[in-house]
Amino acid sequence: MSVTKRLSAILQAKANKALDKAENPTEMLDLSYEKQQENLQKVRRALADVTTAKKRLELQASQLQGQAQKLQDQAKQALAQGQEDLAREALTRRTGLADQLQSLGTQHEQVEAQQQQLENTSTRLQAQVDAFRTKKETLKASYTASQAQANIGEAVSGISESMADAGMTLDRAQDKIAQMQARAGAIDELINTGALPDALGGGGDDIQRQLDATSQAGQVDAELAALKAEVGPGAPAPGLPAGAEGTPGAGEPGAPPAGGTP
Amino acid sequence: MIVRILGEGTYDVPDADIPAVEQLDAALADALERGDEATFSGALADLVGLVRHTGKAVPPDDVRTSELAVPHPGSSLAEVRDLLAQGS
């Protein structure tokens, strides 16, 4: 059966339900006006949520880009150290990041579409509320006439259909926002634990640790060599003032001269 | 005929264009039934395009009721299925 007819029927049912409580046309007008204002507030709040979600996605994308750059640098550093496996690992993780970035891009597009739709709804509702405010007073003033009653019925059913639409649009936006927030939360967690590059585990920045360990070892070697050069062969035993070198019997056990191996 | 695009507003579509709307509507219903996401998305985009193109946008303060309601542009098959389930 026709999708648009079924949807229309659902919309009308929702519209009628919204005004069930009203007991007479005047009350219906007031209730309808109240509902419109409520709706407008809700749409505005949702719009603020969407904007926040969008900003969060943008922040995450920039964090991920930073991590991707870092992995690229690490791969370079690893290659310079001759650690090809480590470089490969860094690049592999960088690929994983690229996938995440792409998915963030898709979400960003979706959130922008939501934002656009809610802005559109908000503008339309505002125009309706403004127009309805004047209309309802005119209708109320003349509502004893039977024609006016018909007019009220018409105005109210039109406006309540529009409100039902806004309600459905809001529901949809809120579902999307909730999904997006859940995903954003998961990504934040990954970024915070540093586990993002390989979602399979091995959290923390172990690549950096290995690079640091290698460069630390290199630095220790260099410092050692510098010390050796400074001290020269036949280092003094510890605990003795400089210049007292060579005193026989001063070398205590367990205190060999610095630098056992070249 | 007044046609509403959910989340967007209403359009006054000339009667001459209604058969084309109905045709796309049928394609939409068929894709929905078969769970054919690609055809569904295509038909929905075409339907939205047709209504926007052939219809005249009704100003927001003109609150005539509509006879047909087109799903939110860009809706997934699952979303529309959920919406329709609200009526059953």
Image: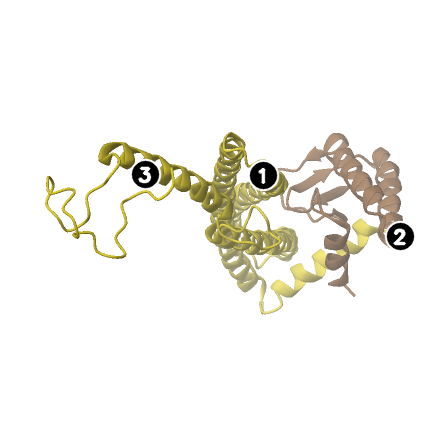
Chain colours: A yellow, B brown
Residue nearest the observer in this picture, A232 or A222: A232
Q: Is residue A165 above or below residue B46?
A: below
Helix, strand, or loop for circle 3? helix
Residue nearest the observer in this picture, A143 or B43: B43
Mark 1 packing: few (<14 Cα in 10 Å), some, or many (20+)? many
Q: How far across and how far down the image is residue A10, in percent?
A: 73, 59
The quarter of the rendered structure image containing the C terminus of chain A is: top left
Are discs 2 and 1 located on one and the same chain?
no
Residue A94 is labelled as 1
Tell me the distance, in whole angstroms, between the alpha carbons under discs 3 and 2.
74 Å
Mark 2 or mark 1: which is in front? 1
Residue B34 is labelled as 2
Q: How far across and how far down the image is residue B56, in percent?
A: 70, 33
Look at mark 3 in the image and give the residue it sits on: A224
Q: Which three-letter amino acid code belongs to the residue tagged 3?
A: Leu
Are discs 3 and 1 located on one and the same chain?
yes
